[in-house]
Image (cartoon, rainbow, N blue to C red):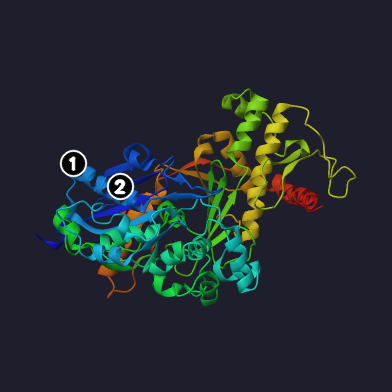
């Protein structure tokens, strides 16, 4: 077959092992989706008795998964592709995305089983409970390790040291504190663990037939990786558990080809023996890769909690928020900010002021002018992460930082429309201020990508465009992490094929040369946005510091 024709038949396989399901997607040479299949853990694997893909542990804040559930899901998802008559012999590269922070502990037997899989049998019949020394493995929802966080930070000289080294302070759900808890409470299991994988590197290990390396971006969610040097930090490892470096193995770039697919998949599913396994990464970095945005873009996910994602040239030293190695740009970083008071607060306001009707909510929001006659509000119904503050504060146009009533503000605004606009503007001013603090540069090139549940709401998106003084786009494809996995497989394959040739295209340029960016412009800022919102940004900061200082008292 001529080379060109052969190239046009190549396909790329991406997986996303999220909290609730495992999904596979197959892209053709033009990077169009030609097949997909999924397994929902709660309904397709009821024997594991998960709710939302996880099991609550015996103690408060504990959540776990039995790793065999994920292995069994892989058996099912591949069979579902086969039933659709998908030709897996065309797959030239595989990569994946997975929920961050979870950890798996391989036994000696498990590592041997990976290397000697029998193609006549299911994966889960061979990589069973005995493959892991911990059968109830902690996932990102587990927040039971505050003690270990405190011990690790103390051991390396404090929280600031941890932030500077690893990009985040110690978080209870991060992998390092979780490993330390297993070392302390189940010392024999830790000692018997030959290797420790993240969920993403576990996914790669299944296809590779041996324990796969952890990539830099997902490794940044462990409180163990020195994000500037991209190596495990000796001080953090020592603060976590003994002989940990051998168990983690060397971390690698997200475009690393780890090897060819194992013989098991060649025989059982007809994958070509030269099919490349590309390092897998976490779902947040993979989503950034799937969005195909550059450093001028800020991504805002409007969900239960609102999440901001951005590219950064330098890691800031913010006590809160996360800085990870960038999944596709080797000299950049990825900033991640999570805010607790997102959709829940908007929904509560919708109930109280608009009888639960979003149509009415939007009408009221649209009926008030930008700037809301100088009325502003902060609604932190739950303890906010940044700033560390809780409570509600409303200021009318006459109140400022040194006013006598700055602390108590006004009890209520005069109408539902003023309440609604004050909430939405206040939330977005908050998001913008924190993004600036993290090091995002706003300018005339800035663009916003809105995702998540509330991104269907045009009126809220218009407020975002105005407050950020930037056009807002939406992505037609909703599963960015899954697309990111398949795109990264395609780009790593391209790099490998062209390693002798210089120069090669950047990741974004290469992907966009094959497929259009699935982005749609949904709204643009009004001309007076800058004039209206720049002074309000400073006012927001004043209000936030008032709320914060109340908490400190």
* Horizontal relation, residue 3 to residue 361: left or right: left
N-terminal of the pair, mark 2 or mark 1, is 2
Q: Position of residue 116 (x, y in %)?
A: 20, 64
Residue under numbered circle 1: 83
Q: CA distance from mark 2 to mark 1?
A: 15 Å
Q: Is residue 55 left or right of residue 431?
A: left
Q: Residue furthest front?
A: 188
Q: Nearer the viewer, residue 320 or 357?
A: 320
Q: Nearer the viewer, residue 67 or 401?
A: 67
Disc 1 secondary structure class:
helix
Instruction: Name the residue at 23% across, 42% down.
Output: 80
Examine the rendering and report whether any part of residue 515 can be seen: no
Residue at the right extreme of this rendering = 404
Q: Secondary structure at mark 2?
A: helix
Q: Is residue 498 left or right of residue 244?
A: left
Quarter of the view holding residue 369? top right
Looking at the picture, how far across and down is residue 500, in whole percent?
27, 76
| Residue 38 in view | yes
Where is residue 328 shown, x and y percent of the image?
42, 63
Q: Say which residue label 2 marks.
A: 73
Q: Which quadrant of the rendered structure holds the N terminus?
A: bottom left
Callouts 2 and 1 close, C-beta under 8 Å: no
Residue 329 sits above or below residue 469 on the image: below
* Residue in the image at 18% along x and 41% along y: 83
Label 2 neighbour load within 10 Å: few <14, some 14-19, many 20+: many
């Amino acid at each position: 077959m001529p080379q060109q024709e052969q190239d046009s038949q190549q396909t790329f396989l991406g997986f996303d092992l999220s909290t609730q399901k495992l999904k596979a997607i197959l892209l053709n040479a033009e990077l169009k989706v030609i097949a997909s299949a999924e397994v929902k853990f709660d309904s397709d694997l009821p024997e594991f008795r998960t709710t939302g893909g996880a099991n609550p542990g015996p103690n408060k804040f504990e959540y776990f998964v039995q790793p065999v559930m994920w292995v069994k899901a892989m058996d099912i998802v591949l069979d579902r592709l086969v039933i659709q008559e998908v030709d897996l012999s065309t797959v030239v590269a595989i990569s994946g995305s997975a929920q961050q922070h979870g950890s798996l502990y391989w036994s000696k037997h498990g590592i041997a089983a990976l290397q000697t899989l029998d193609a006549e049998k299911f994966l889960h019949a061979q990589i069973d409970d005995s493959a892991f020394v911990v059968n109830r493995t902690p996932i990102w929802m587990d927040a039971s390790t505050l003690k270990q966080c405190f011990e690790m930070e103390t051991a390396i000289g404090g929280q600031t040291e941890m932030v500077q080294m690893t990009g985040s302070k110690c978080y209870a759900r991060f992998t390092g504190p979780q490993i330390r808890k297993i070392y302390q409470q189940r010392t024999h299991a830790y000692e018997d663990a030959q290797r420790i994988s993240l969920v993403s590197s576990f996914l790669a290990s299944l296809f590779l037939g041996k324990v796969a390396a952890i990539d830099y971006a997902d490794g940044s969610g462990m409180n163990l990786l020195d994000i500037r040097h991209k190596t495990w930090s000796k001080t953090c490892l020592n603060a976590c558990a003994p002989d940990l470096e051998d168990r983690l193995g060397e971390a690698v770039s997200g475009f690393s080809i780890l090897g060819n697919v194992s013989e098991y998949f060649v025989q059982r599913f007809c994958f070509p023996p030269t099919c490349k396994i590309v390092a897998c990464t976490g779902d947040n970095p993979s989503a950034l890769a799937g969005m195909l945005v550059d450093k001028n873009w800020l991504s805002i996910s409007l969900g239960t909690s609102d999440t901001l994602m951005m590219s950064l040239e330098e890691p800031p030293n913010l006590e809160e928020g996360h800085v990870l190695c960038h999944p596709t740009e080797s000299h950049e970083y990825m900033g991640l900010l999570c805010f607790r008071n997102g959709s829940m607060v908007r929904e509560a306001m919708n109930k109280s002021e608009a009888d639960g009707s979003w149509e009415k909510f939007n009408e009221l929001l649209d009926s008030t002018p930008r700037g809301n006659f100088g009325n502003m509000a902060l609604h932190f119904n739950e303890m906010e992460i940044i700033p560390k503050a809780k409570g509600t504060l409303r200021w009318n146009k006459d109140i400022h930082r040194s006013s006598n009533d700055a602390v108590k503000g006004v009890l209520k605004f005069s109408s539902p429309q003023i309440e609604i606009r004050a909430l939405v503007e206040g939330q977005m001013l908050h998001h913008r201020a924190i993004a600036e603090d993290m090091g995002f540069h706003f300018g005339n090139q800035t663009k916003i990508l809105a995702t998540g549940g509330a991104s269907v709401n045009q009126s809220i998106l218009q407020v975002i465009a105005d407050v950020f003084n930037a056009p807002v786009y939406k992505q037609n494809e909703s599963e960015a992490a899954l697309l990111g996995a398949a795109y990264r497989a395609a780009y790593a394959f391209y790099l490998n094929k062209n390693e002798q040739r210089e120069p090669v295209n950047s990741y974004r340029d290469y992907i966009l040369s094959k497929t259009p960016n699935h982005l749609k412009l949904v709204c643009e800022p009004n001309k007076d946005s800058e004039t209206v919102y720049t002074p309000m940004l400073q006012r927001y900061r004043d209000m936030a510091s008032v709320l914060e200082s109340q908490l400190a008292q």
